[in-house]
Image (spheres, rainbow, N blue to C red):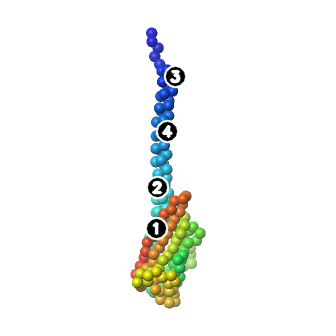
Amino acid sequence: MKKRGFTLIELVVVITIIGIIAGVVGFILFGAVDAWTFRLKRAGLLSDGRLAINRIVREVREVKDLTSVIAASSSQFRFIDTDDTDITYSLNGSDLERTEDGTANTLAENVSSLSFTYYDSNGSTISTPAVSPSATDIRRVLIDLTLTKDGEDVYLESESVPRNF
């Protein structure tokens, strides 16, 4: 009578093949998890950045008139809007702050840089814009915003043209 079963060599070969297959599948799964994590982090930063820059663009359009720009530097923009609200956008540490009538609120976190570039009616860059009480020479504002989290950077850029100039 012949005994049925597996030899030790057959078992070792099967275990080795299963180990190789498990290693390959594990490598693929870890790559997929890393890609998903990267996408999730980036999507959160991108969403925060888009919300912030869209709000800035929308409100810069609402500058009341030529004498309503109070401060205009590369790191801060302050103006009075059509509702007579005093609005300031600036960077405080890694927080983008929107200050309304003296009350500061964080518009976005993890901001590594914020810059404003101003252009005149000819499209030339203005290094030192005229501000209140003088009439401003700003006709277009370019906003650059960079958010950084866990080594991931998201760069956003948009421009706004005040309607009432």
Q: Secondary structure at mark 2?
A: helix
Query: Label 2 neighbourhood size at 10 Å, few (<14), some (14-19), many (20+)?
Result: few
Residue mark closest to the camera, 3 vs 2: 3
The image shows residue 143 at horizontal and vertical percentages of 47, 73
Residue 39: mark in rendering: 2
The quadrant where residue 102 appears: bottom right
Can you identify the residue that label 3 sits on?
Answer: 8
Q: Which residue: 52% across, 71% down?
A: 114
Label whose residue precedes the other's in the sequence (4 or 2): 4
**Measured from the top left, where is residue 128 in percent x and y?**
52, 83
**Do callouts 3 and 2 mark residues in contact (Cβ within 8 Å)?**
no
Instruction: First in sequence, mark 3 or 2: give its number.
Output: 3
On the question of residue 59 being in view, the answer is no
Going by the numbered disc 3, the residue's amino acid type is: Leu
Residue identified by numbered label 1: 156
Q: Is residue 5 above or below residue 148?
A: above
Residue behind mark 4:
23
